[in-house]
Image: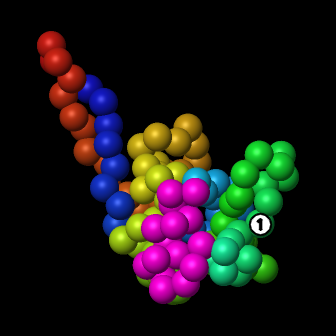
Amino acid sequence: MTSQYECQRCGACCRWPGQVKVSDAEIAAMAAHLGVGDGEFIERFTRLRPDRRGLMLLEKEDNECIFLDGVDCRVQAVKPRQCRTFPDEWNLLEHEEKCQAQKWLIPTDGS
């Protein structure tokens, strides 16, 4: 059996400090969604990652994602892959203490 999680849109993952890395394609999608150009999006909503190997989304002073509004994501329809795959592709044991995602057990072949 493997497990998969269904997001309950609690917003807890958007309040953790960390780096939400964004690709050029993700920047373009979020910029279009917000009705701004790529350059304006980069200036307003991103900064250089500490390792200088790309861009990441800004955080508010309290470590919330710049796009979190209450428990709603302003870019939900086009949010970055890193956000879409949480917590399924993450290796964070503590996520179950904070995240309200519904865990589903999925039979694997031969089970």
Quadrant in which the N terminus is drawn: top left
Membership of 85 in magenta stretch? no
- Work out whether 61 lies above or below 51: below
Query: Number of numbered discs present?
Result: 1
- Work out whether 89 lies above or below 57: above
- Work out whether 83 lies above or below 66: above
Q: Could you tell me which residue is drawn at 17 percent across and 18 percent down?
A: 109
Q: In the image, which residues are magenta?
A: 24-38
Residue that extends furthest to the top in the rendered view of this protein = 110
Tell me if residue 45 can be seen: no
Is residue 33 left or right of 61 when viewed as pictured? left
Q: Position of residue 63 (x, y in %)?
A: 72, 72
- Magenta: main secondary structure equals helix
Quadrant in which the C terminus is drawn: top left
Membership of 27 in magenta stretch? yes
- The residue at which mark 1 appears reads as 47
Query: In the figure, residue 23 lies in which quadrant?
Result: bottom right
Identify the amino acid type marked 1: Arg
Q: Position of residue 52 (x, y in %)?
A: 83, 49
Crowd around label 1: few <14 · some 14–19 · many ≥20 (10 Å): some
Q: Position of residue 85 (x, y in %)?
A: 43, 49
The one nearer the camera, 78 or 13, is 78
Q: Could you tell me which residue is drawn at 52 percent across and 42 percent down?
A: 90
Tell me if residue 3 can be seen: yes
| Dot 1: element | strand
Query: In the figure, residue 15 lies in which quadrant?
Result: bottom right
